[in-house]
Amino acid sequence: MTASGHHAHADQALIELRQARKRYNIGQPNEAEILHGIDLRVAHGEFLALIGPSGSGKSTLLNVLGLLEPLSDGAYALQGQAVQGLEDQALTLLRRRALGFVFQFHHLLPAFTALENVTLPALMTEGRVSAAAREQARALLDAVGLAGAMDK
Ligand SMILES: Nc1ncnc2c1ncn2[C@@H]1O[C@H](COP(=O)(O)OP(=O)(O)OP(=O)(O)O)[C@@H](O)[C@H]1O
Ligand SMILES: [Mg+2]
């Protein structure tokens, strides 16, 4: 990666962390640093697996990358946008636009069908579920083998 600023878009990382630190309970006796200065660059289209022992900080890092937790120190840029100092609402909009999260413990809404759960992001983005959004949701469920469970 160049630091010159030329070809900024082609060089732009999807995710870029510099010296990222995360501490919990700052200033208290049980203060703990979980992320110890992480440098990470993820390119557009790159697939990444994060592995490590239980308690090593994988979820902490994903919560930071997913804009659910702020860093204690260091810098995070998502799609070239510096994340530090963004207001809560801006973080929410960026999260909605740029991120998808599949949680370890899934958070499907039990009163809705599978298809309705998948169309929820479209509902929140556009205020309605268009026919195109519904078709896309059907295709996504079909792609993961859930074609038969859409209305469950
Ligand atoms: N909100 C919090 N407050 C204080 N400590 C926390 C908090 N969240 C996580 N920790 C601590 O940070 C460390 C890393 O936790 P984390 O959940 O990121 O690990 P993990 O690698 O995802 O583990 P697992 O494989 O079990 O999911 C643990 O010691 C945990 O107790
Ligand atoms: Mg975890």
Image: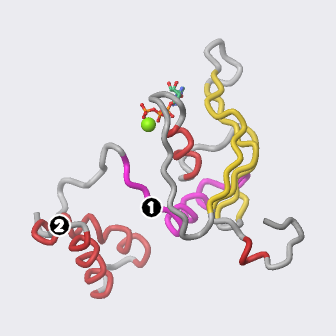
- Residue type at the position of mark 2: Leu
| Residue corresponding to mark 1 | 100
Question: Viewed as shown, does residue 30 lie left or right of 113?
Answer: right
Specify the amino acid type for callout 1.
Gly
Looking at the rendered structure, the number of numbered marks drawn on it comes to 2
Question: Farthest residue in the bottom direction?
Answer: 131
Give the SS element for disc 2: loop
Query: Which residue occupies 62% across, 60% down?
Result: 42
Residue interval drawn in magenta: 83-103
Is 126 part of what is drawn in magenta? no
Q: Which mark is residue 146?
A: 2
**Which secondary structure, mark 1?**
loop
- Residue 3 image label: none
Q: Are marks 2 and 1 in contact (CB under 8 Å)?
A: no
Give residue 80's position: percent from left, percent from top: 71, 66
Residue in the foreground of this view, choosing between 115 and 58: 58
**Residue placed at 71% from the left, 20% from the top?**
27
The quadrant in which the C terminus is found is: bottom left
The part of the image, by quadrant, that contains residue 108 is bottom left
Q: Quadrant of residue 79?
A: bottom right
Image side of residue 122 versus residue 82, left or right: left
Q: CA distance from mark 2 to mark 1?
A: 19 Å
Report the residue that reaches farthest toward the right.
4
| Distance from mark 2 CB to nearest ligand 2 atom below 8 Å | no
Q: Quadrant of residue 149?
A: bottom left
